[in-house]
Amino acid sequence: MAVVVVLVASSAAGFALRRRQGQFRQAPSAAGVLTAADLGAPLGRQATLVQFSTDFCTFCGPTRELLTTMAGERDGVAFVEIDAANRMDLTKRLHVLSTPTVLVLDASGGIASRASGQPRKADLQGALDLVLRGGGQA
């Protein structure tokens, strides 16, 4: 009986974690601002999509394609990819615990929202649209 309880609890926890994977959530107000110097690339005029990746990340390639496409379809939106292993300063500062981690920055570099895991296109569009409409945090 104990084995069944453990299996059910483990399955429920795994399902809950998978459901949250890739969903954007509002960044805390203390999340701070990222500058072009932090990123090693210019900020977008209206928004910047930032992806933390690693060489061994399974979902980083498809996420990169999605973010590149989304930035290319929107005027004033930039895409920056950061190698998490080579930028431990930012990884620690921003509490990046898994890759891909995606940040949506506003025009001033403020972190509006973030997602851990591969985001769905609709979720990314919603988070980006909120920033582009001047709504700030998702």
Image (cartoon, rainbow, N blue to C red):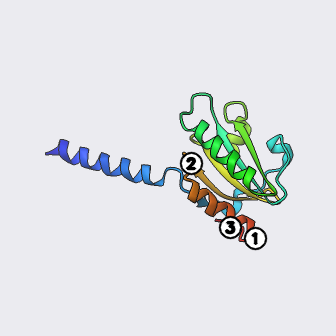
Kindly tell me whether residue 96 is visible in this rendering. no
**How many neighbours does mark 3 have within 10 angstroms: few (below 14), some (14-19), or many (20 or more)?**
some
Label drawn at residue 116: 2
**Residue 30: x and y, percent?**
70, 60
Q: Earlier in the sequence, mark 3 or mark 2?
A: 2
The N terminus lies in which quarter of the figure? Answer: top left
Q: Earlier in the sequence, mark 2 or mark 1?
A: 2
Q: Residue at x 37, y 50 (%)?
A: 15
Q: Is residue 59 left or right of residue 89?
A: left
The residue carrying mark 3 is 130
**Three-letter amino acid code at the position of disc 2:** Ser
Q: Residue at x 72, y 40 (%)?
A: 81
Question: Disc 1 on helix, strand or loop?
Answer: loop
Question: Disc 2 on helix, strand or loop?
Answer: strand
**Three-letter amino acid code at the position of disc 1:** Gly
**Residue 82: x and y, percent?**
72, 38
The C terminus lies in which quarter of the figure? Answer: bottom right
**Three-letter amino acid code at the position of disc 3:** Leu
Q: Residue at x 75, y 70 (%)?
A: 134
**Residue 122: x and y, percent?**
57, 59
Q: Is residue 114 above or below residue 65?
A: below
Label drawn at residue 37: none
**How many neighbours does mark 1 have within 10 angstroms: few (below 14), some (14-19), or many (20 or more)?**
few
Q: Is residue 35 left or right of residue 22?
A: right
Q: Mark 2 against mark 1, which lies toward the viewer?
A: 1
CB within 8 Å, label 2 to label 1: no
Kindly tell me whether residue 66 is visible in this rendering. yes
**Residue 118: x and y, percent?**
55, 46
Q: Nearer the viewer, residue 124 or 41?
A: 124
Question: Disc 3 on helix, strand or loop?
Answer: helix
The Cα atoms of the two marked residues, 2 and 1, are separated by 23 Å
Label drawn at residue 134: 1
